[in-house]
Amino acid sequence: MSKVALVTGGSSGIGYALVEHLLAKSWNVVIADITPLGANVKFPADRTLFVKTNVSSFDEQAELFSKAFKWHQRLDFAALNAGIDDRDDIFSSIDTSKPPTKPDTSVIDIDLTAVYYGIKLFAHYAAQNPVPGGKIVATASVQVIILVRRYLSPRAAAHNITINAICPALVVTGLEPTFRERFPERLLTDMSIVMRAFDELIDETLGHNGQIVETCAEGLYYRKGIEAEAPSMKEIVRLPAMAEWQASLIQRNIQRAAKIQGRL
């Protein structure tokens, strides 16, 4: 049976290109976006499922993932790609003659919180796959990089789930259509390079987990981890006590989740 992928932000840009790419490789694809597909889009009806979704809403994402899994009783890959550009500037909006206004946090809601929602929901359904497990690739903001590399990917591995992220450089999409006018052509990233990153990160034989991949004009660059600089920090991260402390945090969070779900 063909595998099933879910692509958020699949109506345009990188998400749309990824849908086309996966369909060409015989995947079934669930397309999630707040914007419907254009009337001229002719994806095969038997291999695509569109679900209108505001990814910043946990309830809407939960409904999305439920429909995606029920479609073929499996969910093998989630591309958590939906994103927007910055919508707020704290320092440019300073006006001491008036009370401060509430900042627009939509970029955090969509580019970070929604990714966290998607990872949690994917883990739930991936555990029900014929062979439990699956693959997640996030289109990364700075916050997502930390989330993927340092926090979630090591724990996901125990459940046969990999979590990686791509960092696209100058890709011409609807989000930034002026790149071609502003920058030399030699610095622009061809969409085929971005698709190559997705291919490598979901390749079973490569087994990538916790990787951050820059997609740029020259190709793919796998980022190295951020190393501690201070001697005391280098010593701390090597101590057995650090691993024990991290394990205690995981256990505490397990107990908190159990209380929320009424199991304790």
Image: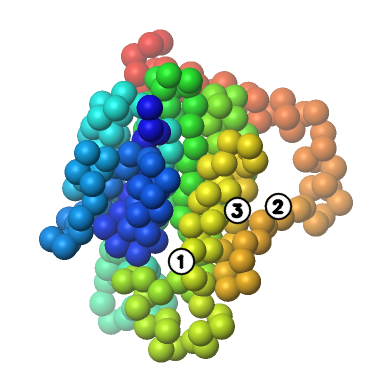
Q: What amino acid is found at the position of numbered circle 1 in the picture?
A: Met
Q: What amino acid is found at the position of numbered circle 2 in the picture?
A: Gly
Which residue lies at the image location 62% right of the left edge and 48% below the top edge?
Answer: 211
Badge 3 vs badge 1, beta-carbon distance below 8 Å = no
Q: Position of residue 231 (x, y in %)?
A: 86, 51
Quadrant assignment, res 102: bottom left
Q: Position of residue 227 (x, y in %)?
A: 76, 53
Judged from the image, the secondary structure of the residue bearing numbered disc 1 is helix
Q: Position of residue 180 (x, y in %)?
A: 42, 84
Circle 1: is it few (<14), some (14-19), or many (20+) Cα within 10 Å? Answer: many
Q: Quadrant of the C terminus?
A: top left
Badge 2 vs badge 1, beta-carbon distance below 8 Å = no
Judged from the image, the secondary structure of the residue bearing numbered disc 3 is strand
Instruction: Say left or right for 245 vs 40.
Output: right
Instruction: Give the mark nearest the N terminus, 3 or 2.
Output: 3
Which residue lies at the image location 29% right of the left edge and 27% below the top edge?
Answer: 72
| Distance between mark 3 and mark 2 Cα atoms | 9 Å
| Distance between mark 3 and mark 1 Cα atoms | 18 Å
Quadrant assignment, res 230: bottom right
Q: Nearer the viewer, residue 81 or 120?
A: 81
Q: What number is the disc on residue 191?
A: 1
Mark 2 — residue? 225
Q: Nearer the viewer, mark 3 or mark 1?
A: 1
Instruction: Give the mark nearest the N terminus, 3 or 1.
Output: 1
Q: How is the image coloured?
A: rainbow
Badge 3 vs badge 2, beta-carbon distance below 8 Å = no
Q: What number is the disc on residue 212?
A: 3
Judged from the image, the secondary structure of the residue bearing numbered disc 2 is loop
From what the image shows, is residue 9 above or below residue 250?
A: below
Which residue lies at the image location 63% right of the left edge and 71% below the top edge?
Answer: 218
From what the image shows, is residue 203 above or below residue 244?
A: below
Q: Nearer the viewer, residue 198 or 234?
A: 198
